[in-house]
Structures are given as C-alpha cells and as structure tokens.
Image (spheres, rainbow, N blue to C red):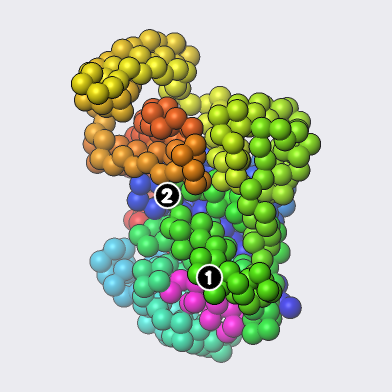
C-alpha cells in the first residue's frame, strides 16, 4: 500500500468559502483536531493576508507536533518572508508559493508574459529556501494551462528547489479522465519530476473534486489537498473524509493508504460545521446525518440479517457509535467519559468535569441524550468558552396570545455586564432588538433558521442566524434546549463573527496595500 499524504487546507482554502469566518482561536482548535487525527500537512493560512492569518499560522506552528505546518505565499518576497516568519516556531514547516500559469490568468490577471512568470518562479522558490527546504509550488489554473508551458514551469520550480509540485484544478473545470491524463503526462514529460512529490488540489465546481483527485492518485499523485466537509472557495474543495474513506474502503482497486485516524472524522466534521455555521447536508457522503441511516423496510431487514448487505463501511470507522441512544439522567461520570472518548474527544479532567455538569443539566430537561447532543455540548464548550467579546448571560421572556412580547437580557460586552429590555413583534424579535440595542449594532438579519438537533419535542434547537453589514456576511449558530435562548446565542455568535470579519477585511486591505517590493505585481 503506497502512502498518500493528506494535506488539509480547511484553515486556508476552506476559510475562503463565502460567509465562513474563523477566529484565530477557532483555527487553533481545528488545527489541534487535525494534528490529533494525523493529517500530514496543515495549511494554516495565508500569513501576509491579515494579522489574524499571521497569528493563526504562528499559533498553529506552536501546537502541531505531528503535522507539518504550511503557510501560503504569492510569488513575491513580502509574502514569502511573512510566511517564513509566521512558521518560525513550527517543528516541521512548509512554504507553499504559487503563481498563475494559464494564458488567461497571465494575460488578464497578472499582466505578465511567460518569461516573467518563469523568472518569478525561480526568485520566489529561491527566496522561500531561506526559511525551509520543504517548498511546495503550485501553477495556479494548471488544468487550463498550455501543457508544454506547464512542463517548463514545473521543471523550473524543481530546479529552483521545490520539493512538492501541486497541480490545482483551480476552477473545477477538469473531468476525471482528463485530469488523470494530465498527471500521467507530467510524469512522462518533466524529466526531473522524480525529485518532487506530485500533489493535487481540486475544486468542486462540477462536483468532480474527489473523482479528479482519486484519478490523479491512480496516475501517480502522492499528496491530495482537501478540506473537512469539502468547504472552500465557491463550490468547495475535495472533501477530506471522502478521499480518506475511499482509500480505506476500496483498497482492492486503490492500493493506497492515508495515515489519517478515520475515527475522528465525525467529531471534526461537526466542529468545522459549528464554527463556520455551514451545516452538512443530510445526504452528504460519510458525514451527513443520513449517511448510515437505513430507512426502507427492505434495507432494515437486510441490515438485521447481515450489516454488509447495505453497509460498505461501519459507522464506528468514522467515529459514530453503533448504539445511537447513549446516556440519560442516571448515567455516571465514567460512562460519560467513555462516551466522549468514543466520539474522539480527549479532554482534560477539568474540562470533563465542566462538561459533565452541562450534560447533567441537559439530562434533567431532556430524557434521552444522543450523540448529536453530546457533540453540541462539547463543541459549545470548545468554541465559545471564555473568549467572545459579546456574551449572553441571561434571557427572560414574556409573551402570549394577544400580549406584546418583551425580553429582558443580561449581556456582557467586553467584560461589562449590561441589562436591557425590549419589546418586539414576538419573543425572538424582542430578543434580537434587545441585543441590537445593547451592542449598538447596525447589522441586518438576512436569514433565521431553526432545526432540531435530534428527534422528540424535547430536542435541543440549533438556530442559525445570518447577519450582513457593509457587504460582509456571517452565519452565527446557537444551541439550546430552549429555542429562544438558542436564538439569542446564535445572534450573539454572529455579531462576534462579524467583528472578526470586519477587522480582517480592514487588515487585509492594509496588508495588501503595504506590499511593495521588486516582484510585488504578481499579486492575486
Ligand atoms: O485553487 C487554487 O488554485 C489554490 C492555489 C493557491 C493552490 O487554492
Ligand atoms: Zn484552491
């Protein structure tokens, strides 16, 4: 079984998904999970793009003991030096530098000719070598690049010191047979290709990102770039969980292995979905709610007789427990701890104690506690605790038939506790108005959605709130047994994210304006 390196770009390309935003702490948390699940390389961000990205790459560098940490850089010295600086403390570091090579991109985006691009490749890789020997180079829009020119750029990159050559299908245009052939042609037309690892980075605009990546592996690629839940620019990237489970499940036709601990897939999928506010569609392969549910009578009958009749992989192999119904009011701390471990968490005793209290309080209100309930409690504790600028402390509501709804809230804004009352058309409207009043927010509510996390009238509610302000849009999420409280939490979560995003947008404009060096026109 040949090893396939898994390069996760959830924190870089994944964050480029419209409407997704992650704070530095969110990114560090996801990186901890990626490192624990033994992803080979974590692309932690694009350090030159903003202060937040710089900090994320720098902090991820300090906590990743297993995974190599990678920072993205365009072909200019400012970007590369910044990436080198951000990666300084990583035990294993990689700089990923790129420039467009297709005629279309060179003419309209870069306004550079082929010789200038070749020159930029040499200079950028040589510069990156000051910081590490592990250099990845990408010809952006490779799948629409003239083949002979592509071979020349790859040859130049390897001669200049690149150790990984990543072939991106930037616009998700390729089809599997074509993309596989491209990799095969690179192998036979680039004479020094055996000195580098071939990687692929496929976008999902035609829904072919995973198929294209796997065909590339069959033809000789040894690294696949992917993201958790397939998030990423536009239609997203190849989904990590699909790539890894294809390799694991179809070893008969795909004699390759990844080093990823697949039992951690469900857990990290849930975490990324909660942080970004992007729910996973129920029928999504591997991590969708229905991925292991058998609905029809014929299928259920088959499953009872032998699980292989309708199951090509086990739920346990991706970190789901076989028995769905798990704990209740009388469950003890030990059972709770074991359950968390089975779900892929490795919390400290102190955290477990805190989570157990939350679990007990939920179990007092709700008879049956499902895996999804525990994932929601654990994620809330990991993501939201102790670091939000705005925090909801308490809500009380008065409403009813023929009564005007009123809400009284206690909110902490940057450590100051504030009390506020507001009326509204209904209780949710009153809560949102009270939050807006306290925080003086001018954001517009564009989406409000409620879903039950599990079945039953006592299910926890998961509320999503999309806010928009000055062209910036964010999704906030909140969970609670009480829909109104969940709504308040979601609104506040969205406001916290909006602040991060606004800060980031202004930093990136500053940062891009500050670029001023000899090859700085190669900017994206
Ligand atoms: O899609 C793309 O081309 C990229 C590059 C930076 C590799 O994300
Ligand atoms: Zn990409």
Q: Residue furthest right?
A: 334
- Using the image, determine if residue 311 lies above or below residue 336: below
Task: Give left or right: position of 199 versus 322.
Answer: left
Q: Nearer the viewer, residue 138 or 272?
A: 272
Q: Secondary structure at mark 2?
A: loop
Residue drawn at x 44%, y 79% is 150
Q: Which residue is mark 1?
A: 297
Q: Quadrant of residue 381?
A: top right
Q: Is residue 213 magenta?
A: yes
Residue drawn at x 70%, y 43% is 340
List x then y, in percent, for residue 222. Answer: 63, 74
Question: Dividing the image into 4 quarters, which one contains the N terminus?
Answer: bottom right
Between the residue at mark 1 and the residue at mark 2, the CA separation in whole angstroms equals: 32 Å
List x then y, in percent, for residue 519. Answer: 39, 56
Q: Over which residues does the magenta segment extend?
A: 208-220
Residue drawn at x 76%, y 43% is 338
Identify the mark nearer the N-term, 1 or 2.
2
Q: Nearer the viewer, residue 187 or 176?
A: 176
Task: Give left or right: position of 110 versus 142.
Answer: left
- Using the image, determine if residue 475 lies above or below residue 73: above
Q: Check disc 1: other Cα within 10 Å, few if <14, some if 14-19, many if 20+.
A: few
Q: Which residue is mark 2?
A: 278
Q: Is residue 120 magenta?
A: no
| Circle nearer the viewer, 1 or 2 | 1
Can residue 175 be seen in the rendering of this structure? yes
List x then y, in percent, for residue 171. Answer: 36, 69
Task: Give left or right: position of 341 versus 42.
Answer: right
Q: Secondary structure at mark 1?
A: helix
Q: Main secondary structure of the magenta part?
A: helix
């Amino acid at each position: 079984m040949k090893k396939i390196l898994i390069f996760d770009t959830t924190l870089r390309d994944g964050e480029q998904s419209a409407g997704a935003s992650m704070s530095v702490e969110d990114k560090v948390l996801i990186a901890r999970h990626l490192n624990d699940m033994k992803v080979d390389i974590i692309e932690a961000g694009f350090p030159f793009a903003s202060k937040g990205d710089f900090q994320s790459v720098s902090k991820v560098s300090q906590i990743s003991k297993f995974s190599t940490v990678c920072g993205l850089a365009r072909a200019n010295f400012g970007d590369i030096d910044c990436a080198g600086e951000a990666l300084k403390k990583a035990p294993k570091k990689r700089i990923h530098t790129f420039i467009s090579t297709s005629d279309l991109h060179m003419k309209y985006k870069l306004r550079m000719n082929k010789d200038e691009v070749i020159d930029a490749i040499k200079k950028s890789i040589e510069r990156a070598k000051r910081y590490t020997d592990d250099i990845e180079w990408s010809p952006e829009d490779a799948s629409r690049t003239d083949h002979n020119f592509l071979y020349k750029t790859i040859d130049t990159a390897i001669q200049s010191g690149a150790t990984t050559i990543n072939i991106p299908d930037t616009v998700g245009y390729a089809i599997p047979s074509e993309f596989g052939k491209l990799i095969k042609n690179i192998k036979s037309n680039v004479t020094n290709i055996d000195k580098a690892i071939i990687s692929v980075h496929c976008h999902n605009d035609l829904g072919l990102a995973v198929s294209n990546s796997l065909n590339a592996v069959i033809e000789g690629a040894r690294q696949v770039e992917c993201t958790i839940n397939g998030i990423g620019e536009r239609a997203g990237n190849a989904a990590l969980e699909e790539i890894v489970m294809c390799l694991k499940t179809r070893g008969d036709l795909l004699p390759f292995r990844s080093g990823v601990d697949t039992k951690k897939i469900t857990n990290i999928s849930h975490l990324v979905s909660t942080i970004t506010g992007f729910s996973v569609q129920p029928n999504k392969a591997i991590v969708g709610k229905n991925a292991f549910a058998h609905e029809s009578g014929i299928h259920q009958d088959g499953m009872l007789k032998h699980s292989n009749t309708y199951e090509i992989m086990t739920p346990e192999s991706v970190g789901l427990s076989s028995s769905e119904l798990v704990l209740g009011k009388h469950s003890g701390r030990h059972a709770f701890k074991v359950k968390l471990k089975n779900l892929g968490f490795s919390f400290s005793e102190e955290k477990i104690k805190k989570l157990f209290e939350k679990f007990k309080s939920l179990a007092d209100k709700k008879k049956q506690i499902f895996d999804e309930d525990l994932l929601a409690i654990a994620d809330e504790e990991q993501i939201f605790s102790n670091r939000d600028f705005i925090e909801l402390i308490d809500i009380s509501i008065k409403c009813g038939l023929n009564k005007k709804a009123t809400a009284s809230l206690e909110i902490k804004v940057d450590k100051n506790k504030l009390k506020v009352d507001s009326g509204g058309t209904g209780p949710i409207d009153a809560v949102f108005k009270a939050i807006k009043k306290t925080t003086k927010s001018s954001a517009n509510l564009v989406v409000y959605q409620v879903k039950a996390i599990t079945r039953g009238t006592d299910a926890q509610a998961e509320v999503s709130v999309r806010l928009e302000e000055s062209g910036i849009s964010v999704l906030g999420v909140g969970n609670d047994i009480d829909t109104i409280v969940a709504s308040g939490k979601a609104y506040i979560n969205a406001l916290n994210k909006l602040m991060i995003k606004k800060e980031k947008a202004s930093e990136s404009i500053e940062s891009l304006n500050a670029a001023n060096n000899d090859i700085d026109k190669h900017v994206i």
